[in-house]
Image (cartoon, rainbow, N blue to C red):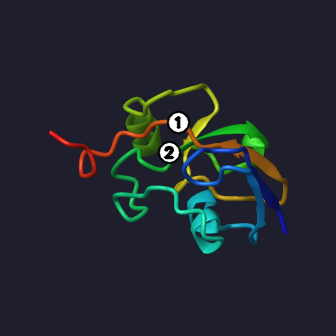
């Protein structure tokens, strides 16, 4: 069972964390299953960027990005070449290290 190492994030896991999940599970589902409440405003339907993560290790082991995810990632805050929407990034057999960006674009939570 692959392990996801989450780098420290002030809001979601200040000390960092390591969780395991079966292959085929999305990173978002795995985090939520282990009480790391990453935002996912569209309920994991690949319609927003609130669950954006940066995959620091193990990027190549994840499933390929589809066109919809690529288009959405263009709108993510802090986009990097190894960015993924955690709701679309499915684990294989390799461990991964992820960083949850400091900010997220969530219009539902923002004060206008």
- Dot 2 corresponds to which residue? 66
Horizontal and vertical percent position of residue 56: 74, 36
* Residue that mark 1 sits on: 102
Determine the secondary structure under disc 1. Answer: loop
Taking 18 as reference, is 112 left or right? Answer: left
Residues 55 and 19: in front is 19
User: If you read the primary sequence from the N terminus, does the residue marked by circle 2 or circle 1 appear first?
Assistant: 2
Identify which residue is drawn at 43% across, 62% down. 44
Percent x, y of residue 100: 59, 43
Which image quadrant for residue 73?
A: top left
View extreme (left): residue = 112
Q: Position of residue 69 (x, y in %)?
A: 45, 43
How crowded pointer 2 is (Cα within 10 Å; few <14, some 14-19, many 20+) is rated as few
Number of other residues with Cα within 10 Å of mark 1, as a class: few under 14, some 14 to 19, many 20 or more: few
Q: Residue at x 64, y 32 (%)?
A: 82
User: Where does residue 50 sit, x and y in percent of width and height?
Assistant: 42, 48
In three-dimensional space, the C-alpha distance between marks 2 and 1, rounded to whole angstroms, equals 25 Å
- Decide if residue 52 is on the left or right side of residue 68: right
Quarter of the image that includes the C terminus: top left
């Amino acid at each position: 069972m692959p392990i996801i190492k989450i780098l420290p994030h002030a809001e979601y896991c200040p000390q960092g964390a390591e969780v395991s999940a079966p292959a085929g599970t999305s990173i978002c589902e795995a985090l939520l299953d282990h009480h790391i409440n990453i935002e996912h405003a569209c309920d994991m339907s690949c319609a927003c960027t609130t669950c954006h993560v940066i995959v620091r290790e193990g990027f190549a082991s994840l499933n390929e990005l589809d066109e919809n995810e690529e288009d959405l990632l263009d709108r993510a805050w802090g986009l990097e070449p190894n960015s993924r929407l955690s709701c679309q990034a499915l684990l294989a057999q390799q461990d991964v290290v992820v960083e949850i960006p400091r900010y997220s674009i969530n219009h539902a939570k923002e004060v206008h």
